[in-house]
Amino acid sequence: TAGDLVITEKFDALALMTINRPKALNALDQLTLQQLDAAVSAIEADPQIKVAIITGSGEKAFVAGGDIGVMQPLDPLGARRIAVDVQQLLNKIEYGSTVYIAAINGYALGGGCELALACDIRIAADSAQLGQPEVNLGIIPGWGGTQRLPRLVGSSMAKQLMFTGERISAARAAQIGLVSEVVPATGLLARARELAQIIAAKPKMALQLIKEAVNNGREMDMQRAFAYEADLFGLCFATADQKEGMLAFLEKRQPQWRDQ
Ligand code: HXC
């Protein structure tokens, strides 16, 4: 499905996607974006996959951003096009039925930070640095950063990061809720896989409905959001795994999930 700029490995219910353009610190040029799009589509089309990890190849970078060489000569319509196209790709991740974990192994800057923001969970190596340095290039984040970052860390912190363009450490990112865990760099992938295995062992419909409740509910007022939650809660009772999960508890045994 994908070529060599985005490598997808599959381990049963788990996929590991590696962005592999280390000579440019995994900056996303058109070909890399195309391959990332194809890789995400393939994951979403594979009913066996429940969790996908996204990481960068090499020790230095997760993704150092959109490719600045590609963007420099763009005209306004071309720039708008690339913003809209990549926003759609990142929405495929955010609103997809797979759980995405960003394993941030190094620089996650600009579009790289925005890619991580579209994932459900972010964990980082202690050596990683994150930031939205677009202001230093005379632009603003265009792959969802001005919207997802304030929703995650609050407007004040998000504006500070975007106005200053400063890079922050993984430890600081954890303090502000931008990443949920920091682990020694050598153990990052092992921890990401451990987390992925724990999640992949859960029933798929419940995972999917949790993701939908959080992501869609965030866009509603509280009363509608509660009603929506109740509807999705009801929907759980149409699944075989709800009957099995509760029966297994009552029979004091482990559940046998069927992912339906
Ligand atoms: C293109 C990039 C790149 C990028 C790094 N490289 N980041 N190429 N686009 N975003 C390339 C460098 O040009 C260099 O290529 C090689 O990767 C290694 O980078 P160095 O700068 O030599 O490494 P180092 O000195 O260690 O510095 C690392 C760095 C720095 C701090 C991460 O590379 C940097 O500041 N990169 C830009 C980060 C950035 O501004 N990202 C946001 C982009 S805007 P050569 O050929 O010289 O070896 C964005 C907007 C997206 O993402 C939304 C658009 C709608």
Image (cartoon, rainbow, N blue to C red):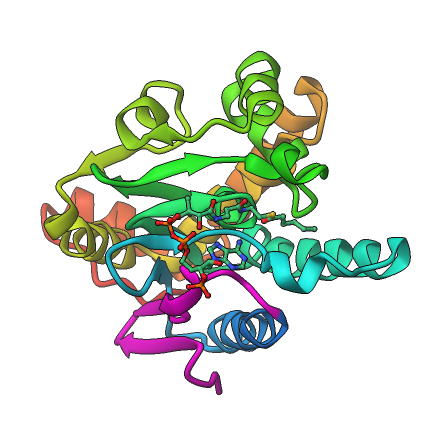
Quadrant hosting residue 124:
top left
- Residue projecting furthest to the right: 77
Q: Nearer the viewer, residue 25 or 50?
A: 25
Q: Is residue 92 above or below residue 129?
A: below
Quadrant hosting residue 217:
top right
Residue 49: image location, x then y, percent: 38, 70
Q: Is residue 207 magenta?
A: no
Instruction: Identify which residue is drawn at 54% across, 29% down.
Output: 165
Q: Is residue 17 above or below residue 75?
A: below
Q: Is residue 117 left or right of residue 183?
A: right
Instruction: Identify which residue is drawn at 39% across, 19% down.
Output: 176
Residue 82: image location, x then y, percent: 74, 60
Residue 169: image location, x then y, percent: 31, 29
Residue 96 in view of the camera: yes
Residue 73: image location, x then y, percent: 77, 61
Q: Is residue 7 left or right of residue 226?
A: left
What's the magenta region?
1-29
Quadrant hosting residue 70:
bottom right
Instruction: Identify which residue is drawn at 56% across, 22% down.
Output: 164
